[in-house]
Amino acid sequence: MEFKLLRIDLWNQKVREEKIDEKILRKFLGGRGLGAYLALREIPPGADPLGPENRLYILTGPITGTAAIESGRYHAVAKSPLTGILGDSNSGGQFGPWLRFAGYDGIVLEGMSEEPVWISIIDGEVKFHDARSLWGKGVIYTERIIRENVGITKEDLGSVLAIGPAGENLSKISAIMNDRYRAAGRTGLGAVMGSKRVKAIFAYGKRQIELYDRQKFFEAAKKLMKKIQEHSISQALGKYGTAVLVNIINEHGGFPTKNWTRGTFEKAYEISGEYLAEKYLKTNKGCWGCIIRCARVAEVKSGPYRTPVSEGPEYETIWANGGNTMIGNMEALIKINYLLNDLGFDTISFGNTAATLMELYEKAQKGELPEDKAKKLLSLLGDIEPTWGNADAVIQLIWRTAYRDGIGDYTAEGAARLAEAFGSPDSAVHVRGLELPAYDPRAINSMALSYATSNRGGCHLRAYAVSFDVLGVPKKFDPLKVDLEKVKLIKFQQEHFAVIDSLVVCKFNTFADSPEDYVPLLQAAMGWEDLTTEELLTIGERIYNVERLFAVREGHGYKDYLPKRLVEEPLPDGPAKGKTAKEAIEKYLPEYYKLRGWEDGKPLPETLKRLGLEEFLYIVS
Amino acid sequence: MEFKLLRIDLWNQKVREEKIDEKILRKFLGGRGLGAYLALREIPPGADPLGPENRLYILTGPITGTAAIESGRYHAVAKSPLTGILGDSNSGGQFGPWLRFAGYDGIVLEGMSEEPVWISIIDGEVKFHDARSLWGKGVIYTERIIRENVGITKEDLGSVLAIGPAGENLSKISAIMNDRYRAAGRTGLGAVMGSKRVKAIFAYGKRQIELYDRQKFFEAAKKLMKKIQEHSISQALGKYGTAVLVNIINEHGGFPTKNWTRGTFEKAYEISGEYLAEKYLKTNKGCWGCIIRCARVAEVKSGPYRTPVSEGPEYETIWANGGNTMIGNMEALIKINYLLNDLGFDTISFGNTAATLMELYEKAQKGELPEDKAKKLLSLLGDIEPTWGNADAVIQLIWRTAYRDGIGDYTAEGAARLAEAFGSPDSAVHVRGLELPAYDPRAINSMALSYATSNRGGCHLRAYAVSFDVLGVPKKFDPLKVDLEKVKLIKFQQEHFAVIDSLVVCKFNTFADSPEDYVPLLQAAMGWEDLTTEELLTIGERIYNVERLFAVREGHGYKDYLPKRLVEEPLPDGPAKGKTAKEAIEKYLPEYYKLRGWEDGKPLPETLKRLGLEEFLYIVS
């Protein structure tokens, strides 16, 4: 089964097809794994993430776009301008499948265009278009103009991947968007696309995806589909969306509030999935071929936060821009989410950055910032008054950040650089520069290890320890108790999730699935009849090591740690009152390194040899 | 006395000094007059206003920056992208004087830069700077960055003239801004500067302005200053700002409301100058060397419309974005004004365009637009719900218009093109494409002639008939009575105002001054000892004819008319209930042409000969 990569030389507007060797696919599958491998080989050490030497990989996997097992996704990979190490992010919607139908399994953007362009890929034919008049425009209107241009206006035919002004203006917290509301959000990859001056890619075509044994594939898919469909979490996600977590996490005292200074938010119910479903939901929606349908189609009919019918906020968005900034108003959050999508932001990073700004503002007024920094901050705010809970200020801040105006020139850099610029680095809660998501590890202690060891920086999608610490999948643990058994589970998740991101399928499968489920699927798709579950998890481990090697080679970003606030400041409220994440991280980390075959965050040579990564031994020796 | 023009070749980043012949100055003075003359000679007929063949003139006059007689102004001239004929606009602040102190009496931007630039002119030295990182930014932050760059951060030293994103994105209702809050707003000249990719010009220097007879000049200036200072209107302007007019015009039933469908607004008091002074005023402020000090320094301390200490809204801004859109909320208007300044819009044109959009939206919902147009309109609105009085929608619309996103791609074109695009051309109230200002000629009938014959399109600053119809200067007329004596006064004002704009001084002098006052000033400044009042008014008449010739040569824009709504739809309310402007315009126009020596809007050859404009006879013969 071939995997066709489209290499796009932006300097010369030339394209080249490349068939990926099946041996490489068997080692890395596709998506995230293949991206990490290619990035480590092709992006030179020390590369400027916003320079032409960086490359942006948009990759599907062997299962993308095949059958209704949540396979409508792609994975984006590049060196991150936010973290300075490997950046990658996964997105649903329809772009992944349509890219394959258009004739390619992946795209590599190389070099840099002189002028803004957008690219159409229709039935294998690649065309470059002048995007100067699209530059500065939001994602939603961009999609409209591109669809009118190619003459395919029906929403479910073909797909547009685009950046908003945030990406154009090289915001380090910008996303790559597709299908208007779906985001490859994390690690600032929108800015990489922006630096290459590619505004958008349209994909459409009628290519049938090759499968080695179609019948066997569909039988295995059907079986997995049934498991997913019947799982209670799948059903809850369909009914209330990801924001079903708001009340749950808040009740556990792990809903970070007021920029990580509290663990519960008194207005949690008013920004919960239940409240959203009751008041603003038009319908739910799935990505390509999805049976879970967690997306929220919402509307705010009128008033200051009027928002048209569009995909509503996810749990992470609601938390980062709601609890963390103390905006307890669902209408405002629907609007904020809409604007963040339209202007092309990572909603998690943006919300953290806004909350950091609120903390800095409070400190400036209390005289807790260096005097010159406080003065500078206040003079840059203009019409933005970043008080806790001020939704109107956040709305204006979104615009200013997208175009890097005034204080927005600083918030566009993300929370860590913002806090640093105004003399209060610990006001940013991040790991490796990536702002943390919505689970306080002081209340859900496995997340301490999950965050600290995530290769792309503070992230819940490398190992979702909430699954066992809170939701009881595969079994329930005490989230406040330090238990070394959890370390094994986290390592397992990191490997399983790496496989999931490389196939590419949706991580929401993982509440119901197990790695075994993908063995017959891959056997049938690729003809790898001797594939085993063990090999699959080894692929996951290999990917995890390759990602880590990128950071080791850069000479930074491989140390595993938690932000100071979570280790030193006990939670003042909720069920985890008095807790820090200090004990957890100190006990988990040595055990984790033992399991991984790592030392001080670096893979040992024998580990690389065991994983067949001899070509990268030079990095650790 | 020499007049030094700095010609800037943007293609090659080269500059050239040119001394304007004194004979030309004596015919056109400077500022508006000189700009009209140079534009008619240098801009080729049929030129694309946004093409390199257009030229942008930023001109001071012989009195600019001399003494405290409101001489802190400049005049901008180019072919207008909004009207397609000669565009020009006048602005206060400090830029005019600082340009002269920097060594030049005027600038001509020629050609077009490949990449965005900004230009510094410091003590006669001109430098070009890369403005790529400033592109997209608001005017206020742009000024900050430029001042930091040149190392002159004190606000009253030097001056920055800049465009906002509106001008960059070629909005036809964009302004050239200076000193952050002052605008050469009308006729879309921001887009001309944007098309040439000039983001900003900084001027600073220590050149002393030459005067032929300094002592005589100061004596004459002192005398005029006293007249101005003692006039009751000067004092009212200092106390309440231009918005002192809100209540007055509303009481006359000429305060256009709900996009010119009514003549009174029930919330007028809440958006009046008195209310502004009572609730939000920090202090008043004057332009360079001003004794009237009509500018409002205002602040909204917190809440959804929080606005930092900045120059507050003028009467026209309050009306266009308040009464005309039915936003009866001063805090919202202060914020709207701040954003419009920062993003670089003509507030009169923007407010009219927003009100036109509201009317179109209402019509779309009532089924009064063609079905396909209504559908298109609704689908382009996104999160903007343009209902009457909806300030939040207007705030979002400002952002979308600045970056031409969604419906903003249409509102950026101004009211006339917006209304045309959605099948309801009469929903835009304009003359020659320029949206009308805040006086309904159905209630103040001299404004009918004033608007119809204004060379730059619907404008109150070519002849301010409100002065005699409402304010009683030089004497009071009945604003509802058609009286041919008013025609003479309008022609007089048109000539006097052309002189005022060419000297360059502030039009607020004209409540107190008379043309005689400028004769000794010009004699002393230029050494023209034989200058008479009659010659001065002939200069004004000459300028008025040259401007008109530009339109005649273009083959359009010289017909004098009023928009259909004002001629056919009687006012439904207030003191002018039942009135249209039909009788006024029909009776005034023939009388006006007789006085002007024009036929059907075109100057007759003998008129041009009388005015010494033989070189332009080719245009009318």
Image (tube, coloured by chain):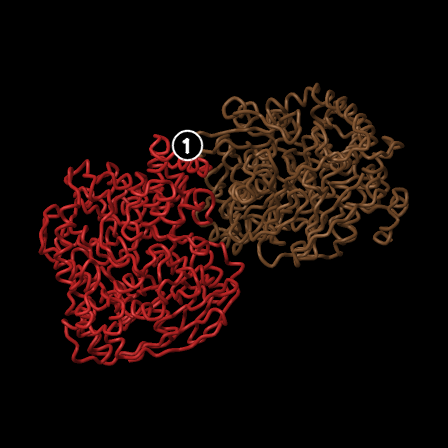
Chain colours: A brown, B red
Residue type at the position of mark 1: Gly
Dividing the picture into quarters, in which one does residue B194 lie? Answer: bottom left
- Residue at the image position 14 percent from the left and 70 percent from the top: B516
Give the residue number, with chain letter if any, for mark 1.
Answer: A303
Total numbered circles? 1
In this rendering, the answer to whether B10 lies above or below B243 is below
Report the side of A267 relative to A465 (left or right): left
Dividing the picture into quarters, in which one does residue A268 lie? Answer: top right
Q: Looking at the image, which is closer to me, A103 or B107?
A: A103
Q: Looking at the image, which is closer to me, A423 or B448?
A: B448
Chain ID, mark 1: A
> Is residue A551 visible in the rendered structure shown here?
no
Report the side of A452 relative to A259 (left or right): right
- Residue at the image position 35 percent from the left and 59 percent from the top: B80
Point out residue A214 in the picture as x, y percentages from the top left corner: 79, 28
Report the side of B12 relative to A595 (left or right): left
Kind of element beneath mark 1: loop
In this rendering, the answer to whether A458 lies above or below A312 is below
Report the side of A452 relative to A603 (left or right): left
Point out residue B67 in the picture as x, y percentages from the top left corner: 26, 70
Q: Looking at the image, which is closer to me, B595 or A423?
A: B595
In this rendering, the answer to whether A442 lies above or below B484 is above
Q: Quadrant of the N terminus of chain A?
A: top right
Point out residue A372 in the picture as x, y percentages from the top left corner: 52, 56
> Is residue A363 visible in the rendered structure shown here?
yes
**Dot 1 crowding, Cα within 10 Å, few <14, some 14–19, many 20+:** few
